[in-house]
Amino acid sequence: MNAGRAMDTDQILDDTILRHPTLAQCRADISAAYQTLAGTFRRGGRLLICGNGGSFSDAEHIAGELAKAFLLPRPLTGEQKARFCEAGDIGAALAKGLQRALPAIPLGTAGALSSAIANDNGQEFIYAQQVLAYGTAGDTLLAISTSGRSVNVVYAAQTAKTMGLTVVALTGKDAGPLGERSDITIRVPAEETLLVQELHLPVYHALCAMVEQEMFGGD
């Protein structure tokens, strides 16, 4: 994928699989996940993301690609710029500097809240409690676990399903109990943690690029 070069969503996925041929078997699930994320954002919903360790970093990485420009420019619309410019010089600076965003929230980044949940209720409830706090029916949870067995991620997925969120899981070859609680599961063809993580990155970069193309590529 090349920054600044417009590609349709099929081309983006084709390009990803060309560079990572082992992901060909995941194509249908990646496409389904993209459709789910794009649909969520089109309806005005939010994406919640969770994972542990390296997957926690991935959750933050994904939010960073969605909440500001990734590969395509995302200037504010003319109407948005006009409204900001009504505020004078500061508004004009904001109109020039801000980018259109997609609401992607990595869970667990509020340290005081997460430590309070872990201390008062147990570490396994950290993400589930935050899904309950921030999620609403029609939102999507992207749950990342290389093993599919991270208890706090599984609890978050079950909470999301109970609340009417769509659950997309990103796992290794064995999706474990997380896969059983997900609407869409992207099982990358690897089992060792570092190899799973190496394949997760091109998957979520493709998803972010495809969603960005869908939401902003026609501008």
Image: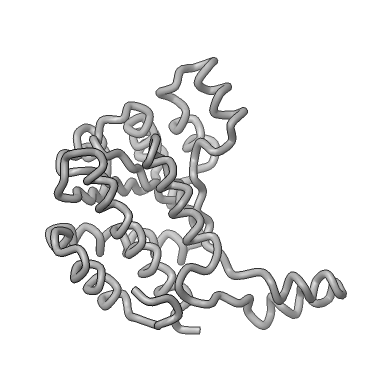
Measuring from the top left, give residue 60's x and y in whole percent: 48, 48
The furthest residue to the front: 194
Q: Nearer the viewer, residue 59 or 101?
A: 59
Residue at left 29%, top 73%? Answer: 12
Q: Nearer the viewer, residue 16 or 121?
A: 16
- Give the image quarter of residue 88: bottom right
Task: Count every numbered label the image shows and give the total.
Answer: 0
Identify the image quadrant of the N terminus: bottom left
- Give the image quarter of residue 194: top left
Residue at left 58%, top 22%? Answer: 116
The furthest residue to the right: 88
In the displayed structure image, the side of residue 13 where residue 89 appears, left or right = right
Q: Nearer the viewer, residue 148 or 43?
A: 148
Measuring from the top left, give residue 133's x and y in whole percent: 54, 36
Residue at left 63%, top 79%? Answer: 77
Measuring from the top left, give residue 58's x and y in whole percent: 40, 48
In the displayed structure image, the side of residue 150 where residue 40 appears, left or right = right
Q: How is the image coloured?
A: one colour
Measuring from the top left, give residue 33's x and y in whole percent: 30, 58
When the figure is inspected, residue 62 is found, relative to residue 212, above or below; the finding is above
In the displayed structure image, the side of residue 77 where residue 191 appears, left or right = left
Residue at left 32%, top 64%? Answer: 206
When the figure is inspected, residue 38 is found, relative to residue 198, above or below; the finding is below
